[in-house]
Image: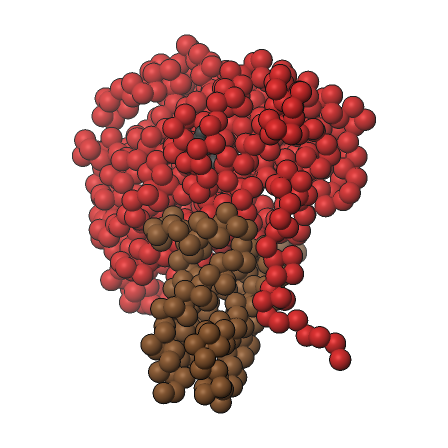
Amino acid sequence: MSLTDYLRQNQKAILKDWFHAVVDSYPAETAAFLKKEKDPFANPVGYSILEGLQGVFAQVVEGAEQEKITPFLDRIIRVRAVQDFTPAQAVSFVFSFKEVVRTRLEGDGRLQELAGDLRTLEAAVDQVALMAFNIYMECREKLYELRVEEVKNRTARLLERANAIWESQRKGEGSREES
Amino acid sequence: MAQVPKADELAKVSHRPPETPWTETPVEFRPGTFCYGAKPKNLEVVGLPNPREWNPADEDWKLPDNWKDITLNGMKDRLDKFRSFKLFMDICVRCGACADKCHYYIGSGDPKNMPVLRAELIRSVYRKYFTGSGKIFSKYAGARALTERVLKEWFYYYYQCTECRRCSVFCPYGIDTAEVTMMARELLNELGCGIDWIAGPVANCYMNGNHLGIQPHAFKDMIEFFVDEIEEVTGVRVEPTFNRKGAEVLFITPSGDVFADPGTYTLMGYMMLFHEIGLDYTWSTYASEGGNFGLFTSHEMMKRLNAKMYAEAKRLGVKWILGGECGHMWRVINQYMDTMNGPADFLEVPKSPITGTVFENAKSTKMVHIAEFTADLIRHGKIKLDPSRNDNKIVTFHDSCNTSRAMGIFEEPRYILKHVCNHFYDMPEGTIREKTFCCGSGSGLNTDEYMEMRMRGGLPRANAVRYVHEKHGVNMLACICAIDRAVLPPLMNYWVPGVDVTGLHELVGNALVMTGEKKRTTDLRYEPLPGMEDEEDDDV
Ligand code: SF4
Ligand code: SF4
């Protein structure tokens, strides 16, 4: 049996381990809430993580292209990029997938047998991690961009108006000079 | 060779908060998670105490020597004066019903954002100094001494509550944590520890009547600028008047509508509507701000800034006041104005001159919300609307915390929306009406240095928008609050790109068929109306 088959068969358990590993990076009370609350609108963080992990898992296992993974990664990182995490903490959940799979294989006594496949999987996960860093940076840059835009817009109409007056005055002066 | 930490080790570096009791974990002031401290010049203008240069991230807050006495006396004063405050300190049974209802908790995962813990930050101090058991057995009674560390925690978490009152909807005892936050902010302000984004607008408003400090002539000039814009789009020239004595109605709206997009389009909508129905109204260039950041400072400051509304109504001799689309302005008007600066016996019970409807609900305050006013016009068939002009907009509606939880305005905006556009979809139950999620930037926290925290707080709101965006293709988020119009665009930009933000009366303005108008080809944003894309090209 290949690692891919193994992952497909154990999808539910692995996803659960992975989800718990990610969610346990929050304070204990919050981790409990993120696991327990089933209404996606009451628990958007838990749901973003869950849906994101499911998507990333499916794509990695099926060897999908990068573009297909991006939206799922984005779901999770967009949230973690604005929470109290360092950049490393924000994206480390990708790497924890390796630990989760390895631990499970070990527990099932399959590590030896699937070691070769596992190395390939781990290389794929490293690729995903690189993408994760890019998304994290995009999110942080977006925050700065939003700040700048907001400051500009606050008085945009005043400036527009002031410029219009200035322009019309200049035109006025210009015509006086000409005449 | 150095040992490279494993992923989970790396991730755990200060990852899970230290397992110390919450009462002993100090807060960390990281950029993006706190607002700048109030500047001395802004405090001086209104005579607030302890004006000085300071930075919340600094170790030394330059507090007055007797800061502890000031704070404890301030607490005592308020416990005596406000029964609600005393009750809220005493009656919480820590049932936890409110715990996961705060958007800041949901978005940040920080347990001190649970409303019950937020209140506990001050309640623990209350127990220590104001209850018998706390004085003797402090540790067991959940009491703690007031220290600078506690004060810093207050600052951090009470400026991380938008006073939205969502938690109070779920509390079986009706404990309103927003009011606890208000008290805490009052106490912080007694030490000069407010935030500048509130102190600045307060000072400006006090000096010049509006948050930006724009003087009367410039205010008038701006509104006239929009008269030109309206004419450009509709061919109709509206004629607003300013400080006109004897007008029937005084109109007051937040100044954000005058200076920043997309509020400006809503402003155009108001003026078009008033023109079309021939409303006898005037602007005041002194009461040129509906917003009241005094509400986020202290009850005295709220009263001081609010007073201009009635003062101007009296000076101009109007019959009643009509108010624009604003959030906290309505909380002040509906909950406090009447007892603070009223009763306004010199005004009449508002009666729509167009439909004859008497607004009994405003019998006391004499101030009507424009959503009520417009819904009444539509109901009586007094205006002609062409909703197809908004056909390119698939709209959902964000209930502002203040208009929904402080006023119960749920139906009027929806009624209007259903008449001015053809595609309207509500967000899921549990995220709207009285349970609406806050924009994450209310109560004076809408400053740019706080963007990271605002994105956390706004996540639950954005998440519900995302759902209708994906399910129904919603591309327009309507609201009736000026702060919403300012802060929802960045929120959408971060979480749900592809969704724009509009005021309700911008959509009314688009749909309104005006007497004598030219063939309209664009909406108020100069974007082609549905089906008019080619005509636009021809014009160019
Ligand atoms: S719901 Fe009310 S009583 Fe229960 S913990 Fe919250 S504030 Fe206290
Ligand atoms: S009032 Fe709003 S922001 Fe403040 S604690 Fe309650 S839910 Fe949170």
Q: Is residue B379 visible?
A: yes
Q: The N terminus of chain B lies in which quarter of the figure?
A: bottom right
Q: Residue at x 40, y 18 (%)?
A: B365
Quarter of image, ligand 1: top left
Instruction: Classify residue B416 as left or right of residue B460.
Output: left
Give x and y (percent) for residue A166: 61, 51
Color used for chain A? brown
Give x and y (percent) for residue B347: 40, 14
Determine the residue located farthest toward the top in the rendered image. Answer: B345
Q: The C terminus of chain B lies in which quarter of the figure?
A: bottom left
For residue B247, which quarter of the picture? top left
Q: Residue at x 36, y 72 (%)?
A: A11
Color used for chain B? red
On screen, B447 above or below B406? below
Give x and y (percent) for residue B417: 27, 43
For residue B401, which quarter of the picture? top left
Name the one closer to the observer, B289 or B271. Answer: B289
Q: Residue at x 41, y 84 (%)?
A: A3
Q: Is residue A131 visible?
A: no
Name the one closer to the observer, A8 or B270. Answer: A8
